[in-house]
Structure formats: C-alpha cells, structure tokens
Amino acid sequence: MDNRIWWKEAIVYQIYPRSFKDSNGDGIGDLRGIISKLDYIQSLGVDAVWLNPIYKSPNDDGGYDISDYYSVQPEFGRMEDFDDLLKGLHQRKLKLIMDLVLNHSSDEHPWFQESRKSKDNPHRDYYFWKPGKHGGPPNNWPSFFGGSAWEQDQPTGEYYLHLFSRKQPDLNWENPLLREELNKLMKFWLDKGVDGLRLDVISAISKQTDFPDTDTPDFNETIRKYYANGPRLKEFIKESKEKVWDHYDVMSVGEGPGITPQNAKDYLDEQDGLNMIFHFGHMFMDQGAGGRFDPIPWTMKDFKQVFKTWDDAFKEKGWGSVFLGNHDFPRMVSRWGNDRDYWEKSSKLLFTLLLTMRGTTFIFQGDEIGMTNTRLSAVSESKDIETQNGWREAQKKAITEKDFLKAANYAGRDNARTPMQWSDEPNGGFSQGKPWMNLNENTSDFNVEAEQHDSHSILNYFRQMTNFRKANRVLTYGSYQPLEALPDSLFLYFRESDKEKLLIVLNFSDQVTNLPDLVRPKISERLIGNYSDPGNTDNVRAWEAIVYRCKT
Ligand code: ISL
Ligand code: CA
C-alpha cells in the first residue's frame, strides 16, 4: 500500500462534449461550456476528466473520425479554449485524459485524400488497399457499423479497409512513416501538459495483413479472432511507450474490445505495455451473435463472474478499469438497475459498486444524477450512425421498424448521448438555442439543480461515495474477494488489506433478501449505505447497498 500511484486512485469523470454544456446558443456543447462547469466537476470529488474527441472532424461518428489531429473541432471552440480548459482543470487539481483515435482517421484527412489518388501515391500505404475478389470485397469482414468492412474507391477501383464507417478508413500501422506521424501528434498534445491518453480501439491497430475470411457468424468472436490481438499489437504498444509516453508523466488506458482475460497481460506490462485497458466482459454479455442490435438476456451470475475473472487476470499484471456505462452504451441505471420503481436506490447501488470495486473508477456524465435511457419513436430520430446503419442492415433481414426500435432503445448509443439535464429551464439549461439532440423527457423531473438541493439525492450520494473511497484506501489497494452467494441477485465481496476488511453488500433485486448466516458474524459496523434508515443485518432491502466494516 506504500507505493501510491495517482491513476490507480483516480476517479475519472467522462465528458461527451457535444452534450455537456453549450455556451453560445448554437445547440452544441462546447469547451467554454465545460469551462463554465469546472466548479461543478470539482464538487463531485473526482480527480480527472476524460474528454471524448474534440479534434476537427466531419462528425460522421461523433468525432471519432478525425480530419485534423492538431486542431479543435470549430463547433467546440478554438485552441485557446482548450488551453484555458486545461489550465482551469489543473488549477483545481484535476487531471485531463485525452481521447486519441489512432486506429483510423476520417476519409477527409489529407492523408487519405492523397492515399486514394493513385496506387503509387506516397501516402498510399497509410491505409489498407486491396483489389476486389470475385467481383466483391477482398474478404468477408463485417464492419462494426453494418455491411462490409471494405469500400471500393475510384479512381483506382481498389477497396480500402474500414472496420467502422466508410468515412473512417483504418490506418496502416505497418508503415513506419505513419507511426512517426502518430508519435508526433501524441507529443503535440502531451507537450501541452495533458495527463493521460485514452486510446480508442487500440486492440485493433495491428492487422492480420493476409486478411483471412472470418469463419464465424458471431460478431464479437470476429472481433476477438480477426480484428483485435493482431501479430504486432504488443510491439506497436511498446514502441509508442518507448518513443512517446515514457517521456512524459502520463497514464495510458487502451480501449480493448476483443482483448481477453488470457491475453490482457501481454499488453499490460509495466515495462512495455499500457497502464490499463477497458475490457468489455460485462458490456457484451447481452449481445447475441448479431452484436448490439441482437440483444439476449443477461444474468447476475455472469455479471458477477466477469468481475471475478478480470480481477484474477489483473492480479498477475496490469490494473483494472471499472465502468458500467459510457458514450457507447445505454444508461447504467436503465441497463443494470431498475429505472422505474427503484430508480434512486438502484442508481445509488451502482455507484456503491463502482466506488468499492478494485480498479480505477470511470463514470459517465449524467450518471451522477441518474440519467436514464431515452426513447426513439422512429429510427429517423437517431443521431447515431451505428443505429442508422444497423437499421439499413435490419431491413435486409425484413426486421420491422418496431422490432428494430426495441433493440435500439435497449442497446443503442443515443441513450447515452442526450444532453445533460442541468435544470428545469428550457432545454434543461443545456443550451439557449435548439439542442442538436432532444433532451430526455424526464429533464424537468430531475436535474442537477434539483438534486443539488436535496441531501438524499443521487448526486449527493455520489459525492459521499467519492469521499468514502478517498477516505478508505483499502478500496483502491486492498484485495477483492467475492463471495458465493444465493440468490444470484446478491452481490457480496470483501475488500481487504493487512490492516482492515470491508464487506460490500449489494442487492440487485426488487425483493427483500436474507443476508447469508455465514457473513453476519463477521460484521462490526455499518459505514455507508443507500437507505437512510440503517435497517438490520438480517435482511437486505430492495436494491439496498451497504458497506460494513468487518471484525479483524
Ligand atoms: O460499442 C461497442 C459494441 O457494439 C464497441 O465495440 C465499440 O464500438 C468499440 O469499442 C469501439 O468504440 C470506439 O471506437 C468507435 C467509436 O464509434 C466509439 O464511440 C468509440 O468508443 C470508432 O472510433
Ligand atoms: Ca456551442
């Protein structure tokens, strides 16, 4: 416990700039908007902000399609605004983690504009180009966003690879010149003094350059077997670390779809790896073979198992990141809690989990007030390319709009992207103009302003919990020991150091449940919980969350 590391102790607040706060009335959240909320962010008790991409982009995929890595998206502001934001964060002792997208660029990036011109263009090999096969694409790879991962392009008639949208061509890391360019742009941002990098789909930067056909209809298996974990992934990470990250006091967290508990250690070496990865064990649990828009039921048994499996993996090497939602997934309380009858209790329970688990905590904007899924009544209301393209594919399978909407409203990314609910003013206090995306209908029912003044609100519980984590370092550095518990809806675990032991009790159900006889004698004191009446140690109430100190 002596060896303290800031990013292991950090609680990270994720900001999706387009939906956070609009400062100039154009309906789009921006950097000045974030600056105006810095005191609020600080008041949450978090240590760092992860900013979703803010670079210049045609915005085909929420800014994950970058056309200039060196400038700020004009809708979000100018470089001066960025510098002020960084300064404002640092003045408040908050760190900044930038989101870098290095697996692909925008097709409007000058590299791609050059690359597509001719087969012998000097930038040709910045991307992957292949002739077609049998009158179709070079192989059968599906894109994350539906349809083929290859697009035929004139003037050369060859196909280029795009694992995401056709406006996001994959960069060819095999090319050392490209890698030098990426190192250069990383240095540009690190020289400004940012404190960490979140590296988008880092798991996919090394390709199987013979591009074999996938042999499985299961999309997540295709990611694991063909897109992620490529032959040079470890080497590329090591090179970035040695050439760039090691020269700064900076933390790295890689987004790792397709990384498994078995191979995570390969990429998380202290000497030559990333500090952390985001794994998707729990996030993909309810996706069927068809991926996001093919939902299947999930069970608490599997959910608990994911935390155990990954904690075991990180015992050996690396460090975990703990999250229950982000800009790519439905709202945490709508997905894992009960956003109707136990909205408040289950939101608080989920925070108790996030802030007592081993691993760095990441929370997504709006979750701190219990924001819920939104409801699209037509696909045309969706602002997300994934949903739009998903619908195009669904139509080919004769799926009705009603059925598709059911899946999209359950799993779609629009759910996470509705603007922040600041107050009950028009547009929830998000913007003076017409918001780029409709606010959730429940904005007047709950918002930051209302929760601010309610000492029992989700917001104030979140603040209590961030303080609680800070005050109990065992929650960062102690071991994680889950307990076998029946019924499955009960999630019980110990966090233990050589000095102390805590028991966390989480009831993921609407039912009152008995606390197992086995643990009751171990309890000495209730430290915190989401019911104001402490209750007793026999029963755990609906969606109750409690942290006990144990006898040692
Ligand atoms: O959400 C997922 C499952 O359907 C993930 O597989 C996700 O698409 C994947 O992790 C990559 O996400 C990241 O890169 C995308 C971008 O659209 C996402 O917003 C970003 O988080 C392409 O840059
Ligand atoms: Ca704006």
Image (cartoon, rainbow, N blue to C red):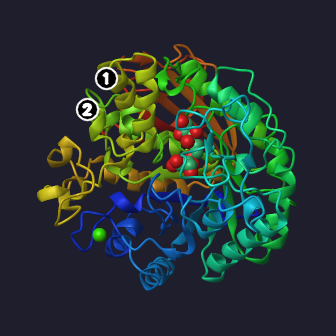
| Closer to the camera in the image, 448 or 396 | 396
Callout 1 amino acid: Glu
Residue shown at the point (53%, 33%) measured from the top left: 146
Residue shown at the point (79%, 51%) measured from the top left: 268
Where does residue 478 sit, x and y in percent of width and height? Answer: 69, 47
Q: What secondary structure is marked by label 1?
A: helix
Q: Residues within 10 Å of mark 2 (few under 14, many from 20)?
A: few
Where does residue 100 sit, x and y in percent of width and height? Answer: 61, 62
- Label annotation for residue 401: 1
Q: Quadrant of residue 144?
A: top right
Q: Classify 308 as above or below 443.
A: above
- Label annotation for residue 287: none
Residue shown at the point (62%, 54%) measured from the top left: 200
| Label pair 1/2, CB-CB below 8 angstroms | yes
Q: Classify 179 as above or below 60.
A: below
Callout 2 amino acid: Ala
Residue shown at the point (23%, 48%) measured from the top left: 438
Q: Quadrant of ligand 2?
A: bottom left
Task: Give the residue number, with chain letter if any, for mark 2.
Answer: 378
Where does residue 153 sit, x and y in percent of width and height? Answer: 61, 49
| Closer to the camera in the image, 44 or 456 | 44
